[in-house]
Amino acid sequence: MIAGTLLALAGGVGGAKLADGLAALLGDRLGVIVNTGDDFEHIGLSISPDLDTVLYTLAGIANPETGWGVAGESWAFLDQAVRLGGPGWFRLGDRDLAIHVLRSERLRRGERLSAITADFCRRLGVAARLMPMSDAPVRTVVETASGPLPFQDYFVRHRCEIPVTGFVFAGIEQARPTPEILAALAAEELGAIVLGPSNPFVSIDPILAVPGLKQALRRRGVPIVAVSPIIAGAAVKGPAAKMMRELRLEVSALAVAEHYAGFIDGVLIDEADAALAPRLEALGLAVRVAPTLMKTPEDRRAVAGHALTLAGAVPAGRGSA
Ligand code: FO1
């Protein structure tokens, strides 16, 4: 376990579940830096899917079937929009619509995404601090053999079917770590940094690509541990395993750890991958083996506890720059 505060890095559903477990253990001692590379403009609205997934999950109102969107959703707006000739491929539910309309209006008036997000957290009773990775727009572009695709076109419209060759984070040069992130990093009580079981290429990498952020996280000198999104050669959710195959990487927790080499001090892997532990240790990493599937709220807390225990077990000095 760690004393003090903790910073987690998260994308969508997997990262949100771990953040929820961490929030149950740490409450307002948790800060979550969330990927905004999936953000896009759709029918005049500014959509931030990963921020909303983490927010709804921590607020206890996420749709349990999809992991994204709001529980108990209805679709009258979408049905009517489609009747009027609007696009139906990206499903905006009636309840979910409220956050997009209000965020878009506040952004138009010049408010920062960080401030809007903090306000939504407060209003939905979320004690943890959710922080977009940057207030400047960053848009993940998926490179494919058939040309570049905006992330949501790749993910939702094409259901991740088109093989990927690489990723570009458009706008990243103008992005900066936000004042909120810099303050969380500067906090004396910060005890560890945890990379959630999110997609390394399109959820965690955009965060680490914000100029100066990866160096600032590393230089902070606290243990950095990752929870593997790959269990027994498959991703729990989403296209991570498929992307790894297409990028000609081995689909394993080992390849995930190698992807983060030089940045992380430890890795939490699933029991199903226990045989990989010696090879991970040979990379100089602290390793913890535990059940990592998060089906229930108890699972989320248990996995969060294992991540904290792992961070606490990183030998002194490993977490220093
Ligand atoms: N994902 C889908 O697969 N289909 C959708 O229609 C869809 C709508 C949607 C609306 C709001 C929102 O916040 C998320 C939504 N997502 C949808 C999820 C989202 O595209 C992905 O979860 C992330 O971008 C990947 O982490």
Image (cartoon, grey):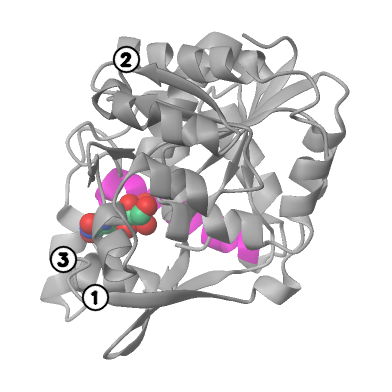
Q: Is residue 58 visible?
A: no
Three-letter residue code for mark 1: Pro
The N terminus: image quadrant: top right
* Image quarter of residue 20: top left
Position of 141 compared to 221: left or right? left
Residue 303, position as x, y percentages in the image = 41, 18
Mark 2 or 1, closer to the camera: 1
* Image quarter of residue 275: top left
Q: Which residue is mark 1?
A: 163
User: Distance between the Cα atoms at labels 3 and 1?
Assistant: 34 Å
Residue 189, position as x, y percentages in the image = 82, 18
First of labels 3, 1 by sequence position: 3
Three-letter residue code for mark 3: Gln
User: Distance between the Cα atoms at labels 2 and 1?
Assistant: 33 Å
Ligand 1 visible in quadrant = bottom left
Q: Is residue 60 visible?
A: yes
Q: Which residue is mark 2?
A: 299
Per the picture, the main secondary structure of the magenta-coloured stretch is helix
Q: Are marks 2 and 3 in contact (CB under 8 Å)?
A: no
First of labels 2, 1 by sequence position: 1
| Element carrying mark 2 | helix
Q: Which residue is mark 3?
A: 80
- Within 10 angstroms of label 2, few (less than 14), some, or many (20 or more) residues? some
